[in-house]
Amino acid sequence: MNFPKDLIKGNVVLGEKLGRHTSFRIGGPAAVWAQPRDVKELKRIVVFAQEERIPVFVIGGGTNVLVRDEGFNGIVIHLGSSAFKNIRISGTTVRAGAGYGVPALVRLCCDKGLSGLESLVGIPGTVGGAVCMNAGGWSSPLYRNIGDYVTGLKVMDNKGDIRTLRKRALSFGYRCSNLSSYIILEADLKLSQEESSALKSRCLKFLKMKGDKQVLDGSSAGCVFKNPKDFQFTTGQMIDMLGLKGRVMGGAQVSRKHANFIVNRDRASCKDVLKLVDMIKKEVMDNYNISLELEIKVV
């Protein structure tokens, strides 16, 4: 790919190994790895890619991504500069840049006495990625997603034009949204006021609950499959009951702690993980007649 050297002043690397930028630590090279310094440089990349018909993938924290062994034959954009990490609080409204970290956002909101995002504690990644996939967790007695609090977004379309999307234009579902055709730049979140001490206590409680059940360390990408709708068991429970915990394919293994996690135990390849994915899907279909849907994104 002939990527113009003078297109942006931000960091550009040809053949950057994407395994370095994902929590799975798996994946081949990107043809181009680009880190624009600001929105103007981002637009130049998007317009160039559109004109040259080059595929583009935007990566945040890389925490729910499985990159194929052959890599990505296109431009991978990382919004890691300070221009995409702005944060502003006005009353109970938080405006966060797409590159702002979710853990930092949860801590800040707790410190400021802003309630709503506590169920996201322990979830890595960035605001842009969390909004695009509608990340969430249990916040007793309800299951809360970040999309429940989004009132507006600033986005860039595939022509490089910046648009503002209000709440009525947004659609959030279980680990999905209608935002896949946009690059999220900023998110407005409407939260509630509550005592900071109560929020911090709740976060510690949620973090302990997650730590007891989930794989919060090691090389994984979180839950691999979505939970089936209106079914008495979670995906993790089904996989566990089928005796698949600890099952190994090459360097990949079904976690012994949480059956809906696959871990990179020994230099696993993407093929190793996908073999486990296919095996699990077949066992669940054969035994429960349920077609599992991936929660992680395969690139």
Image (cartoon, grey):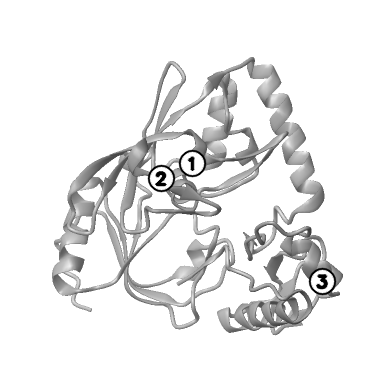
Looking at marks 3 and 2 on the same chain, the residue that comes earlier in the sequence is marked by 2
Q: Residue at x 57, y 48 (%)?
A: 124
Q: Residue at x 23, y 46 (%)?
A: 39
Crowding near pointer 1: few (<14 within 10 Å), some, many (20+)? many
**55 and 7: which one is in front?**
55
Identify the residue under disc 1. Answer: 147
Q: Is residue 132 above or below residue 196?
A: below
Q: Quadrant of the C terminus?
A: bottom left
Q: What is the three-letter code of the residue carrying label 2? A: Gly
Q: CA distance from mark 1 to mark 3?
A: 32 Å
Identify the residue under disc 3. Answer: 245
**216 and 277: which one is in front?**
277
Q: Position of residue 171 (x, y in %)?
A: 42, 47
Q: Residue at x 19, y 71 (%)?
A: 3
Callout 1: SS: helix
Crowding near pointer 3: few (<14 within 10 Å), some, many (20+)? many
Callout 2: SS: loop
Q: Are marks 2 and 1 in contact (CB under 8 Å)?
A: no
Q: What is the three-letter code of the residue carrying label 3? A: Lys
Identify the residue under disc 2. Answer: 99
- In the figure, is residue 137 to the left or right of 73? right
